[in-house]
Each structure stands twice: as C-alpha cells, then as structure tokens.
Image (tube, rainbow, N blue to C red):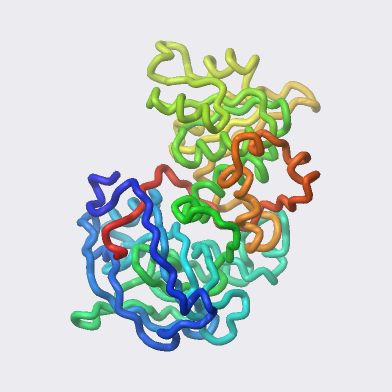
C-alpha cells in the first residue's frame, strides 16, 4: 500500500504538544492557522504536500492538532474513486488519528484546549435514545447528516489552499492527513490514558471493529471455537477480542503463511492457508479442526465469496441448545462494534491489550473487574480496516 500512496511509511510520528495547549489555552484560538497537509487533488494520483489554511472552529466544533494518523483501506478506496457523488476533489483524506485540542468553538463543553482526543467519523451526541442504548451506535440525531465534503451541521468547509484560496473538502468528518483539522464535537472522543499515539490512532477504526465484533456483537463465550477469515488489522483484533473472552480454539485463515506467527501473539491457535487445502473446500477443513464447525465465524475481508465460506464453516444448528454465528466485520459499522456507554471510556477498553503486559492480558474480564477496574467497551465508530501504515514526512 505504501508504494501506491507515496510519502507514507510504517513508522509512527509524534509531534510535541505546545505548552500553551497543555495549560488549557491556545495563542492561535480564534485565528486561522497555516499548516501543511497531504491533499488528494485527483483520483489515484499521489497526494500533494501543500500549505493550507485551517479556519477557526465555529459553534459545536473543535480544532485539533494531529499528533499521529494512520491509513485505512477506506482511505485508499476513496482515493481511487473517480466517479459518483463521493468523488470530490480536492480533499484531505484520513479518518484514524489522535491529536490535541488546539481550540474549541462556542457551545463546546465536552473537551477543552490541551485535551488528548480521537477524531472519529461515527457521530455520537451521547444524549439521544440510540446513543444512550447499549445495543447500537447509530446516533439518531445525526443519522441523516452523513459526513460529507463539508462540516456536518452547515455543510461549509474549514480548509482552503494558501496559494489561491481554493476550497479543500473534508473527508468523513475527520480529514486527519493534515497538521490541523476541524471536526464537530460529536466526532470527538476524549482519552486520558497514556496510550502511545501510534497505537491510539488505531482505536477509531480497525481495533474497535475487531475487538468489538468479538466482544460485543458476537459475545464470544468462554471455551468456544472461532474462525477468522483474513488476518489483517481487523482480523487480528477479532483474535484478541476472542482470546480475551476465553475462546479455546481460534482458527486464522489467510493466504499469507507469515500471518500465523503474527497471529499467535493475538491468540490464534490454528492456521489454514486456503491454497494448501487442495481440492478440499475450506469449510470442510475448518469443520475438521473445530469438530463439526466453528461456533463463531468472522469474515474480515469484505468479499461475498469469503462470507459464504465463513457461513459454511459454522456449526450447523441441530437443536435448541446449539448455536453458531457468522459475522462480517465489513458490515460492523452498521452494528454494535465497541459500544456500551460514553465515548470517554474508550481508553479503558483498550488498556488491557494495548498498555499492559502479557500477564494482565491473560486475565479474564472477571479478574480484570475484580481488581477495581471498570471495563466498559466504548461507543466508538467501527469500519472495516485491512492494514495500517502510519503517515510521516508531512507533519514536521
């Protein structure tokens, strides 16, 4: 992917936080900021490093200094899109990031300058019936206001080119491939734990999709069997979620044999390469490994044919006590993902597997809670994510 998007590398970028923001005030508050951004001018063409102007946030908006961002396959998809209503150029891509609040507009009480936040594309007003529900993460207030090329509430933009004043469009309400961005407050999640920024930026998409899919949506049970088709970021996150829930057998399916060693670190117990199965259908191989079929099947690629394989690999329901579930992480954004209550518990959900050592990771949810920790899976946005490459070069 790095060869298709020049200027990207697999190393994290950390920017120093100014003392003014750390003290809760910003010298640039209320003023336009000139900074650099990776601008997508035409479909499929290399991103262009440009100096842009980022306007101050209006009411209910937050201006964020991006500390670290990563790239999701969704970014690549929209980067290549050359027709249709979503093919809007020029624009600033990126929707997985972590940053520091530089300033806030009127009526913003949830965060302040200096707060560390995740700008996310899935809105959450925290007040409507759906946001307060533990069964979903689709905000009913903003359901009809899908993030477009402008800000969510008024449709206008906050980016423009310094050289000629040309308007530059937003992307999914985030646009993190920039040193600074402006997002609606309903797209901001405050975090406080000292999670490394090159890991925290993954929380707004891939990790939440996988872990939330196993933990919240599938509700994987202890001792159950799980098969995961595709061991990318989402697939590995599913494995971690299943392992944390106590799954006894976690089968990883991938065409890349190197993924098995990596998968072991996330709980994968068995590995199947479809190309090594010969004439035998992959579903039959899975059923042999799982003694009749997996209790839970996760499709983390986004292909209908693989979804069929995942379904056929599941245990057949033969009585009222039998169960099986086939889940496509490609559709996770329409479901629950990592969701329970407030956005601001997001870092709590991630500490056990992002920050603690392996011994703590082996503890069950019950053991974790018995130590006095509140384990809430945050109402975080979810999407299918196939890989991570952290941006650098343009944020200096």
Q: Horizontally, is 205 left or right of 47 in the view?
A: right
The percent position of residue 358, horizontal first and vertical second, equals 60, 35
Q: Is residue 36 above or below residue 72?
A: below
Which image quarter: residue 175? bottom left
Q: Would residue 204 be visible to someone looking at this image? A: yes
Q: Residue furthest front?
A: 19
Q: Is residue 58 above or below residue 241?
A: below
Which image quarter: residue 275? top left
The percent position of residue 68, horizontal first and vertical second, equals 41, 59
The C terminus appears in which quarter of the rendering?
A: bottom left
308 and 65: which is toward the camera? 65
Residue shown at 31% from the left, 62% from the top? 87
Q: Horizontally, is 188 left or right of 390 in the view?
A: right
The percent position of residue 234, horizontal first and vertical second, equals 50, 41
Residue shown at 42% from the left, 20% from the top? 274
The percent position of residue 359, horizontal first and vertical second, equals 64, 34
Q: Would residue 336 be visible to someone looking at this image? A: no
Which image quarter: residue 31? bottom left
The N terminus appears in which quarter of the rendering?
A: top left
Residue shown at 35% from the left, 68% from the top? 179
Q: Is residue 237 above or below residue 290?
A: below
133 and 345: which is toward the camera? 345
């Amino acid at each position: 992917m790095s060869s298709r998007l020049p200027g990207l590398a697999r190393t994290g970028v950390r920017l120093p936080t100014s003392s003014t923001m750390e003290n809760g005030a910003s010298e640039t508050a209320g003023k336009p900021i000139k900074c650099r951004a990776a601008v997508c001018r035409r479909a499929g063409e290399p991103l262009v490093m440009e100096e842009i102007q980022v306007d101050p946030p209006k009411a209910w908006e937050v201006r964020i200094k991006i500390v670290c961002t990563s790239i999701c396959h969704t970014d690549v998809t929209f980067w290549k899109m050359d027709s249709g209503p979503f093919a809007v150029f020029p624009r600033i891509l990126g929707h997985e990031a972590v940053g520091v609040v530089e300033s806030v507009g009127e009526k913003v009480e949830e965060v302040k300058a200096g707060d560390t936040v995740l700008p996310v594309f899935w809105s959450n007003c925290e007040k409507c019936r759906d946001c307060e529900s533990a069964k979903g993460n689709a905000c009913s207030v903003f359901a009809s206001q899908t993030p477009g090329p402008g800000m969510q509430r008024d449709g206008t933009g906050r980016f423009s080119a310094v050289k000629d004043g040309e308007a530059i469009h937003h992307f999914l309400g985030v646009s993190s491939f920039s040193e600074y961005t402006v997002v609606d407050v309903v797209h901001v999640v405050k975090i406080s734990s000292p999670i490394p920024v090159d890991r925290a930026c993954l929380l707004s998409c891939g990790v939440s999709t996988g872990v939330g899919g196993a933990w919240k949506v599938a509700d994987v049970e202890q001792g159950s069997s799980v098969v995961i088709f595709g061991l990318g970021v989402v697939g590995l996150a599913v494995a971690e979620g299943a392992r944390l829930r106590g799954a006894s057998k976690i089968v990883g399916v991938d065409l890349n044999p190197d993924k098995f060693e990596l998968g072991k670190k996330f709980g994968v117990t068995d590995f199947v390469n479809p190309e090594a199965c010969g004439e035998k259908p992959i579903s039959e191989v899975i059923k042999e490994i799982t003694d009749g079929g997996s209790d839970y099947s996760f499709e983390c690629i986004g292909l209908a044919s693989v979804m069929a394989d995942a379904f056929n690999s599941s245990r057949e329901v033969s009585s009222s006590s039998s169960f099986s579930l086939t889940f496509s992480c490609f559709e996770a954004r329409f479901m629950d993902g990592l969701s329970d209550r407030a956005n601001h518990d997001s870092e709590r959900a991630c500490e056990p597997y992002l920050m603690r050592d392996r011994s703590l990771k082996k503890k069950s949810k019950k053991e974790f809670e018995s130590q006095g920790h509140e384990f809430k899976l945050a109402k975080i946005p979810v999407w299918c994510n196939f890989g991570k490459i952290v941006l650098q070069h343009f944020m200096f």
